[in-house]
Amino acid sequence: MRQPLHCLCLATGLALGVLFVAGAGCGKTDGAPPAAADTLAPSEPIFDVRSVTLDARNRPDSSLLVRLRDLGVTHLTLVAFGWQKAPDVPTVRADTGDGWYSESHRGVRALARQADALGMGVILKPHLWVGGYDEAQDRSDIGFDTEADWAAWEADYRRFLMLYARLAAEVDADALVLGTELTRSATERPDFWRGLAEAARTVYDGNLTYAANWHKAYDSIQFWDALDYVGVQAYFPLTDATDPSLAALRTGWGPHRAALAEIHERTGRPVLLTEVGYRSAEGAAARPWEWPERDDGATPDAALQARCYRAFLSTVGRAPWLKGGIIWKWHPPAEVEGPTAFTPQGKPAERVLRRWFTGAAPSQS
């Protein structure tokens, strides 16, 4: 999600399915209260797949993966790109060169070896990049007016995805994401995606999912039964309040938790949140999908980011049908973005993740 998801509506509804602990952390915090005071937190790690998306231009120092392991991370998620000129141009170009390190085949292989040595797994999650670098990513709109154009695009996309199915097999990845936020294709062409899953399984025997947008997408997918997990890009709006309390954020998760539980019941598949992320900025809870443009003038708010993660972990994070969540995102120290970016590293949110991912209360100082 390097660019904004263009979603226009806010979900409303009753806060169904959320278990509240009366009086436990319901007020606003000053960012990251001592985790020992977090009476919502577990005494052991929650859900199976506790992942971060690693985004590295250059090869990271090995200490970065050690830090992630100690944070309680079980999997690295690595994003690689195919390139498409525009949503209505039926050509996908794959790039297997040595560009951005974590996106390259060379980098994926090396990072997978390092992760395995530390007891962590890998998830491969191909994306399509549409247009130029500074253009809005409207990959959800990729679609065509003629069957010939659909067939041409699907042939290209299949070749692109099968490169990563073979790479997933080579590095023994735990999961492969067949596509990310390709809403029109995924909802209008389900037979293509069933066939793609079948083709991927001829070369890769790990778990398959598809990363469906939260907005009018994941509950419309017709091929979940061909996959192992229901995958959801979980940028759900929680509240319009400018400085919401933890209680308000947890209440905001209510209707989304109920809807995710319903799709689990309908499909019989566990749910993997293929992206979960919040900017450390005002408005993060109202519009989590908004990407920080350069110098966008947003006011930093690391405390809100930390509360958003606590709300997620203490509501949906406890659901028995949740396979896991992939945090967006993490960088080598020299590449960390500005104070309003998504990464939780070096911010109060990192301490929140550590508390919930490890289940270990911090020592008292």
Image: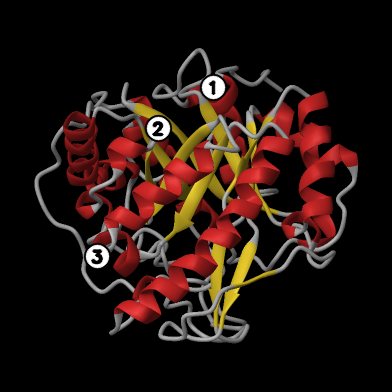
Image quadrant in which you'd find residue 110: top right
Q: Of label 1 and label 2, which has the lower sequence position?
A: 1
According to the picture, the residue beneath numbered tag 1 turns out to be 36
Q: Is residue 178 above or below residue 2?
A: above
Find residue 254 and report its horizontal and vertical position in percent: 20, 41
Q: Of label 1 and label 3, which has the lower sequence position?
A: 1
Which quadrant of the figure contains the C terminus? top right
Name the kind of residue labelled 3 in the image: Glu
Please tell me the numbered disc located at residue 188.
3
Using a 10 Å C-alpha cutoff, classify the residue at mark 3 as few (fewer than 14 neighbours), some (14 to 19) or many (20 or more).
few
Q: Is residue 230 visible?
A: yes
Residue at figure coordinates x 70%, y 45% from the top left: 167
In front: 238, or 329?
329
Query: Dot 3 lies on which element?
Result: helix
In front: 43, or 363?
43
According to the picture, the residue beneath numbered tag 2 turns out to be 228
Q: Of label 3 and label 2, which has the lower sequence position?
A: 3
